[in-house]
Image: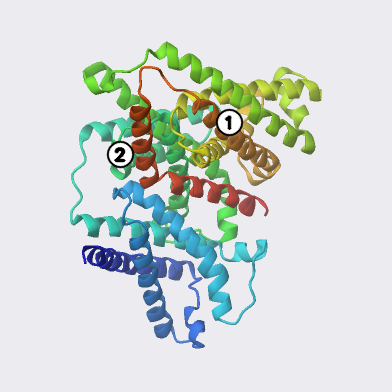
């Protein structure tokens, strides 16, 4: 009976949250002017029937979301990512598949169909995000959110300004908008995700998705403040795609720097015996560096094969003033080794099976596509980084290569790290710690972050193809 009561409560809370998400989705799509004709399912053109049917569907889908995430860690920031990936799933299953079938139209699983439905993709992201936040509020009985502490707000604000300043120095981006967006995004980070401690690697992936959300909000809030409709059309989003890479870097940088500032404050002002290390830093550091270097080389072989196929090794060789493919091979393997070492330092003990290793590694590979070929590679070859559609399209082969590199890096590092069995930790204790950490990661937002990173990667060619 308790199980039935809990499932009923989760379904009802999800349905109510889905109704809230459905209202936001309907209003937003109405402003854009591409409200889907849901009434066609019942062979009607009545707006009233279409709206009623839309809200019924939103409630049903919301109930499914409530049952799906009922056992997750119900923090607004964590559940938000599950809502986003859930909304994306229903864009594929609903707007692209079920709606055409039920309306008697042929399926359009091609690039043109995806471009036409791009506004609906952003609308589904908003539906999922609103549904997730409202669901958490209903389940936790939150009516008025707690007042944020001043310390985390100042830390987030400082992180946003620092990262925005670094991007300005690196790429010469427009200072005033970047500073304003950085300050707002930095202050919003602790409001959304709290001050939960996490490793730099998972924080970076979280920040990468956060940067994508910043870009989506730029497409939405900016036009609304100017009295126009949100820029959700494919053409409008493609015209603004040059803002996506700096937004991703901004979000990732804010998440990492926010964590570093917190660790610095705790190290200087807090004496917490729970932070005492079981092992001297030199011991685990050397093992992590060695494993990261080997994993980086393993991924570098995969990445080099992709670059050789597309003929991009001469461009990589320009970093050392050459255009010879062998020089590009050497440079690429060195870069792969360095990235592997940084992966080991940031994602140490974050992978608990091969799937999580591939997930974290692929996400890290995507981040390095934005930071490397789109940003650092032009800067190191004496060219100001350009994030326009042409530059993004030219760097698309590197995106494929770095996703493959990241998957190989993460899986190899997991296999190397899994061999470690410190003598001072009993097998039972080590297994207990591993299971608890894995459960915390699974019940958190890690799987949703992996899926959302793949979504962002799939969005890149869709926008840069114009």
Percent coordinates x, y for residue 346 in the rendering? 46, 27
Return the residue nearer the eye: 423 or 166: 423
Q: Which residue does the image show at 65% across and 28% down from the upper left?
A: 298
Return the residue nearer the eye: 236 or 342: 342
Quadrant of residue 254 within the rendered picture: top left
Quadrant showing the C terminus: bottom right
Quadrant showing the N terminus: bottom left
Instruction: Identify residue for label 2.
Output: 190
Q: Which residue does the image show at 18% across and 44% down from the upper left?
A: 147
Quadrant of residue 374 within the rendered picture: top right
Few, some or many residues within 10 Å of mark 1 (<14, 14–19, 20+): many
Return the residue nearer the eye: 206 or 149: 206
Percent coordinates x, y for residue 52 in the rendering? 37, 80
Q: Is residue 80 left or right of residue 291?
A: left
65 in relation to 175, above or below: below
Q: Secondary structure at mark 1?
A: helix
Q: Can residue 120 be seen?
A: no
Q: Which residue does the image show at 49% across and 49% down from the upper left?
A: 452
Name the front one of labels 1 and 2.
1
Q: Secondary structure at mark 2?
A: helix
Per the rendering, the mark at residue 412 is 1
| Alpha carbons under labels 1 and 2: distance apart | 33 Å
Percent coordinates x, y for residue 257 in the rendering? 39, 28
Q: Which residue does the image show at 29% across and 59% down from the upper left?
A: 135
Q: Is residue 398 left or right of residue 8?
A: right
Q: Is residue 416 left or right of residue 132?
A: right
């Amino acid at each position: 009976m308790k199980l039935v009561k809990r499932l009923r409560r989760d379904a009802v809370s999800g349905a109510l949250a889905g109704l809230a998400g459905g209202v936001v989705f309907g209003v937003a799509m109405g402003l854009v002017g591409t409200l889907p004709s849901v009434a066609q399912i019942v062979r009607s053109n009545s707006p009233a029937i279409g709206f009623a049917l839309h809200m019924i569907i939103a409630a049903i889908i919301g109930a499914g979301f409530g049952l799906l995430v009922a056992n997750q860690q119900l923090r607004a920031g964590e559940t938000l990512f599950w809502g986003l990936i859930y909304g994306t799933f229903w864009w594929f299953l609903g707007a692209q598949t079920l709606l055409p079938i039920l309306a008697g139209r042929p399926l359009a699983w091609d690039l043109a169909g995806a471009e036409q439905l791009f506004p609906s993709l952003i609308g589904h992201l908003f539906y999922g995000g609103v549904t997730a936040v409202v669901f958490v509020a209903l389940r936790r009985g939150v009516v008025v959110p707690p007042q944020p502490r001043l310390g985390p707000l100042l830390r987030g604000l400082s992180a946003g300004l620092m990262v925005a300043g670094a991007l300005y120095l690196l790429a010469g981006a427009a200072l005033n908008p970047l500073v304003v967006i950085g300050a707002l995004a930095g202050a919003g980070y602790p409001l959304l995700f709290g001050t939960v401690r996490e490793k730099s690697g998972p924080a970076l992936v979280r920040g990468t998705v956060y940067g994508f959300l910043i870009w989506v909000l730029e497409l939405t809030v900016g036009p609304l403040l100017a009295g126009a409709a949100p820029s959700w059309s494919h053409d409008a989003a493609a015209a603004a795609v040059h803002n996506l890479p700096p937004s991703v870097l901004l979000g990732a940088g804010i998440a990492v720097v926010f964590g570093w500032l917190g660790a610095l404050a705790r190290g200087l002002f807090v004496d917490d015996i729970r932070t005492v290390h079981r092992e001297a830093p030199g011991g685990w550091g050397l093992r992590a560096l060695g494993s990261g270097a080997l994993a980086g080389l393993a991924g570098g072989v995969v990445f080099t094969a992709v670059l050789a196929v597309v003929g991009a090794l001469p461009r990589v060789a320009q970093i050392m003033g050459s255009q010879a493919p062998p020089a590009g091979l050497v440079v690429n393997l060195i870069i792969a080794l360095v990235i592997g070492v940084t992966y080991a330092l940031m994602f140490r003990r974050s992978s608990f099976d091969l799937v999580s290793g591939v997930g974290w590694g692929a996400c890290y590979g995507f981040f390095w596509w934005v930071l490397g070929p789109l940003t650092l590679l032009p800067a190191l070859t004496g060219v100001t980084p350009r994030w326009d559609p042409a530059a993004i399209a030219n760097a698309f082969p590197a995106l494929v290569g770095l996703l493959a590199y990241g998957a190989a890096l993460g899986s190899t590092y997991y296999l190397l790290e899994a061999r470690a069995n410190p003598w001072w930790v009993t097998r039972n204790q080590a297994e207990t710690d591993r299971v608890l950490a894995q459960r915390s990661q699974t019940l958190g937002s890690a799987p949703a972050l992996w899926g959302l990173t793949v979504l962002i990667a799939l969005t890149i060619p869709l926008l840069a193809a114009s």
